[in-house]
Image (cartoon, rainbow, N blue to C red):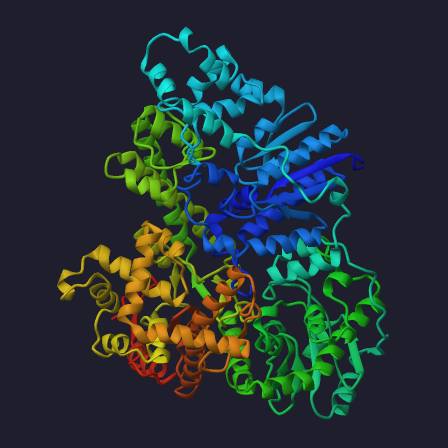
């Protein structure tokens, strides 16, 4: 139960910054269907859930900085002057944080000329005076000065989910100071984060010693005569003005002229409906699943159904005229192994249901499903095809797929719950699976058959009712061809690839596991010997102490919690400390061991020794396919240890080979095509190394011979960065250079490829005019924020407009190639089987006798998928394992 006088104050900017970097390593994982980075929002939401439950406040406020200019910058020009510009990947999330807080029922506030700290300090004092208990949550230890018997300052530790509570007692234990003396300590020691100076050569330890003796900055200067002559005393005398200025800057104001009061901060609780909508927009499915229903289930018209019997099947099927709707229910997401729960079939409001999927094996049914002339309406053609195949049934004749059509009409609203998708199209007479089956581990088919069958009938009727409306929208969008000629037939091809699976040799994986374990053991001993003691290598804290305290290696970077031992830091230390190189090798091998070797061994099917991945066809807004359970698109390729895992991927039997072919730099070729840039096109037409060519241009070199490997690497990052709409921050992070240098590279690129710059400007203008952009094949991506008044939201939409036609067209081209390839294999009656799609690469298995045929056929088919203004280039090769494929 919430205390009726308990105020929670959250330092919005500080916690958002911590939240962003808490999940920084996963920044490209946390991206919603609009391409918005969501890592900070996700971590901030997690923090909110924890602190609201922990503190159960009666009043809440999240305070934000109003801008960089405050009364402190007026007093000291360089206040916070050294701080890097906020990364755009964080800036674009900040407006959405406000939306999250609104949905949570939490007031947010900022005040011109003041910082969030001053808002918090003022309200904390006001609340304490009125008998409130106050908790402050921040990532900034400066706020510990506010701690009193009534005010606890909770500082984030290790991200945003662990808090260290600073009470006056804890401050005394940690610093041997009172909370108010924290201000004096800052005055003496300065603050590198906020960029104010303090006294030269006086650090925290010296400052604490002085304050224990003289109580305050004022006390020290009143008693300077008591100090013995020393360099420190000289610095104190010389820097007197700096000390008092720094103390003033460090002092959090508790009299800020706020326009809100405690009465405005009463916590009313979450607006579940608004929060549900927000989570759907952010693709926060885990948070979504935890939400209670916003309202009682809507009254839905009861739908008539009949339970189907074996005897009635022939007559029922014979009664159908025109398209028939079919839905096969499987509760688990992995439809390769999910138990069957039941099915529904029917048309025109006549629905037949059953839990007995064995009925589908009856001759009348198998004939019905295999008939390509019998039109069938489904939800998720690929799932349905695989499910029926498990029953020994071939499916043909699909004419409508609600999941695929909805995705094409607006890929920003993807998902795979029929009820939710129906609601997107204003059809509400169908429940969601969560409403009927529950969520998480509690998901279950209702024992009450009437409830279950009603839900199946609702699903079938939704598919039927939406078909005409959505098909018409496809025609209006000129996307009916995209559906009928690309996505729907591709769903069947993907289903066939998933069913085929790829054989994995467990003996090879176990041998690699043994080899890696031996090397990990050797590295562990070597690291211990170099450190001259045993410690937990996986502990960043312990490793940091070894490297920077015991071994006295130069500190490259510090974090709030200690020394950074990130990859970039260890890479810089390699040249002077072999232990750094060994730790990197250790980390690489342990990750390969756990993520790939152990992960793959768990999912080898016991019956056929194969791995059957699942391709997500309706996930990404650009149209790219994703692979899950397991993800076979991220099997390592860049380093030799990782590549060895590919040795375990083998053909189905002896005398066969793995054959692979891929497009070379397809996205850059698409960019050259749609931008019509002569310089970019010339490089491809001449067969030049595009990255070396770009390096020559941005570094002003005369010949390719002058291009160093590092120059080529940087040019490659620029080339692909442009395609992905990279910011100067993103490029600087990728290359380990300053943002200023990164901006210079990007500016030079656009100078050398002027039509690329013109394309970027034109596509943004088109997006603003039409509200969406398209690929070469009319795949659309809507950009609702393209006219936003918020700079960050608008900028992000503009970058998305630039890169979506490039990425999306490349994705479409490989899809066309897959369709044409499957058709060619069938027409030529080859045994070769297409197994995997790994972004721009296709993987096959084939008898050795067919390899020569594939070497001619596959590049020819892939090259003919689309006609661009620059030549396509297809590399191919074969070998006894995926590892051994050497492309020419």
The residue lying toward the viewer, choosing from 285 and 768, is 768
Q: Is residue 516 left or right of residue 341?
A: left
61 above or below 148? below
Please report the residue visible at 68 percent of the width from the left and 87 percent of the height from the top.
468
Please report the residue visible at 43 percent of the width from the left and 70 percent of the height from the top.
803
- Place residue 816 in its image quadrant: bottom left
462 above or below 578? below
User: Is residue 847 something one can see in this rendering?
Assistant: no
Q: Is residue 295 left or right of residue 326?
A: right
789 above or below 149? below
Residue 359 image position (x, y, % from top left):
73, 76
Please report the residue visible at 62 percent of the width from the left and 67 percent of the height from the top.
415
User: Is residue 881 something one can see in this rendering?
Assistant: yes
Quadrant placement of the N terminus: top right
Residue 749 image position (x, y, % from top left):
29, 66
Please report the residue visible at 42 percent of the width from the left and 88 percent of the height from the top.
827
Q: Is residue 883 left or right of residue 325?
A: left
540 above or below 502? above
């Amino acid at each position: 139960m919430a205390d009726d006088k308990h105020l929670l104050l959250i330092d919005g900017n500080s916690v958002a910054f911590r939240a962003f970097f808490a999940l920084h390593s996963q920044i490209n994982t946390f991206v919603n269907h609009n391409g918005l980075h969501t890592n900070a929002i996700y971590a901030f939401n997690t923090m909110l859930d924890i602190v609201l439950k922990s503190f159960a406040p009666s009043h809440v406020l999240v305070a934000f900085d109003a801008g960089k200019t405050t009364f402190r910058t007026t007093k000291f020009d360089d206040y916070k002057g050294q701080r890097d510009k906020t990364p755009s990947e964080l800036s674009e999330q900040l407006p959405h944080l406000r939306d999250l807080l609104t949905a949570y029922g939490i007031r947010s506030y900022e005040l011109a000329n003041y910082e969030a700290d001053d808002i918090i300090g003022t309200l904390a004092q006001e609340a304490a005076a009125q008998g409130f208990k106050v908790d402050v949550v921040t990532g900034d230890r400066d706020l510990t000065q506010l701690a009193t018997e009534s005010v606890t300052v909770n500082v984030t530790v290790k991200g945003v989910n662990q808090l260290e509570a600073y009470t006056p007692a804890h401050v005394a234990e940690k610093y041997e100071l009172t909370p108010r003396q924290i201000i004096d300590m800052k005055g003496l020691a300065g603050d590198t984060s906020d960029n104010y100076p303090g006294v030269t050569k006086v650090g925290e330890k010296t400052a604490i010693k002085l304050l224990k003796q003289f109580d305050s900055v004022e006390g020290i200067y009143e008693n300077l005569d008591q100090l013995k002559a020393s360099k420190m005393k000289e610095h104190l005398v010389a820097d007197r003005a700096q000390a008092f200025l720094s103390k003033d800057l460090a002092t959090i104001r508790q009299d800020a002229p706020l326009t809100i009061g405690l009465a405005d901060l009463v916590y009313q609780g979450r607006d579940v409906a608004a929060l549900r909508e927000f989570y759907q927009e952010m693709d926060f499915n885990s948070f979504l699943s935890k939400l209670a229903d916003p309202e009682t289930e809507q009254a839905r018209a009861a739908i008539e159904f009949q339970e189907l019997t074996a005897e009635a099947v022939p007559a029922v099927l014979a009664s159908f005229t025109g398209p028939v709707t079919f839905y096969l229910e499987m509760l688990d997401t992995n439809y390769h192994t999910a138990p069957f729960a039941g099915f529904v079939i029917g048309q025109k409001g006549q629905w037949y249901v059953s839990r007995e999927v064995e009925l589908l094996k009856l001759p009348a049914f198998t004939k019905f499903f295999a008939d390509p002339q019998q039109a069938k309406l489904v939800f998720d053609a690929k799932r349905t095809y695989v499910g029926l195949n498990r029953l020994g049934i071939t499916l043909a004749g699909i004419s409508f797929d609600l999941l695929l059509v909805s995705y094409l009409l607006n890929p920003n609203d993807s998902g795979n719950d029929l009820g939710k998708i129906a609601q997107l199209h204003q059809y509400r007479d169908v429940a969601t699976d969560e409403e009927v089956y529950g969520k998480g581990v509690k998901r279950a088919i209702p024992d009450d058959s009437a409830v279950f069958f009603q839900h199946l009938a609702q699903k079938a009727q939704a598919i039927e009712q939406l078909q005409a409306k959505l098909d018409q929208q496809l025609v209006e969008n000129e996307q009916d061809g995209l559906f009928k000629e690309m996505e729907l037939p591709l769903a069947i091809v993907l289903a066939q690839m998933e069913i085929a699976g790829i054989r994995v040799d467990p003996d090879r994986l176990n041998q690699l596991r043994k080899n890696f374990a031996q090397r990990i053991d050797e590295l562990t001993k070597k690291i211990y010997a170099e450190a001259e003691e045993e410690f937990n290598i996986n502990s960043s804290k312990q490793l940091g102490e070894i490297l920077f305290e015991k071994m006295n290696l130069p500190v490259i970077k510090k974090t709030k919690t200690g020394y950074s031992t990130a990859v970039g830091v260890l890479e810089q230390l390699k040249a002077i400390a072999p232990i750094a190189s060994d730790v990197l090798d250790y980390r690489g091998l342990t990750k390969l061991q756990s993520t790939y070797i152990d992960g793959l061994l768990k999912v080898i099917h016991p019956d056929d020794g194969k791995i059957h991945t699942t391709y997500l066809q309706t996930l990404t807004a650009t149209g790219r396919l994703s692979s899950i359970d397991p993800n076979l698109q991220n099997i390592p390729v860049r380093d030799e240890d990782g590549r060895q895992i590919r040795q375990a991927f083998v053909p189905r039997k002896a005398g066969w080979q793995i054959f692979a072919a891929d497009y070379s730099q397809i996205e850059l070729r698409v960019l050259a095509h749609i931008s019509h840039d002569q310089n970019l096109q010339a490089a491809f037409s001449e067969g030049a190394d595009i990255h070396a060519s770009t390096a020559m241009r941005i570094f002003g070199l005369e010949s390719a011979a002058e291009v160093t490997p590092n120059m080529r690497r940087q040019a490659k990052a620029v080339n692909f960065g442009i395609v992905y709409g990279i910011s100067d921050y993103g490029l600087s992070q990728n290359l380990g250079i300053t943002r200023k240098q990164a901006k210079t590279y990007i500016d030079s690129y656009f100078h050398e490829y002027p039509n690329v710059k013109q394309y970027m400007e034109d596509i943004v203008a088109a997006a603003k005019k039409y509200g969406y952009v398209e690929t070469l094949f009319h795949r659309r991506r809507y950009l609702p924020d393209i006219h936003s008044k918020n700079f960050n939201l608008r900028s992000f939409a503009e970058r998305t407009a630039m890169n979506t036609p490039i990425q999306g067209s490349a994705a479409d081209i490989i899809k066309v190639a897959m369709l044409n390839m499957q058709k060619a294999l069938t027409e030529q009656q080859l045994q070769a089987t297409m197994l995997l799609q790994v972004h721009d690469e296709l993987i096959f298995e084939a008898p050795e006798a067919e390899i020569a045929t594939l070497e001619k056929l596959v590049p020819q088919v892939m090259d003919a998928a689309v006609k661009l203004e620059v030549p396509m280039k297809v590399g191919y090769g074969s070998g006894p394992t995926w590892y051994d494929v050497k492309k020419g």
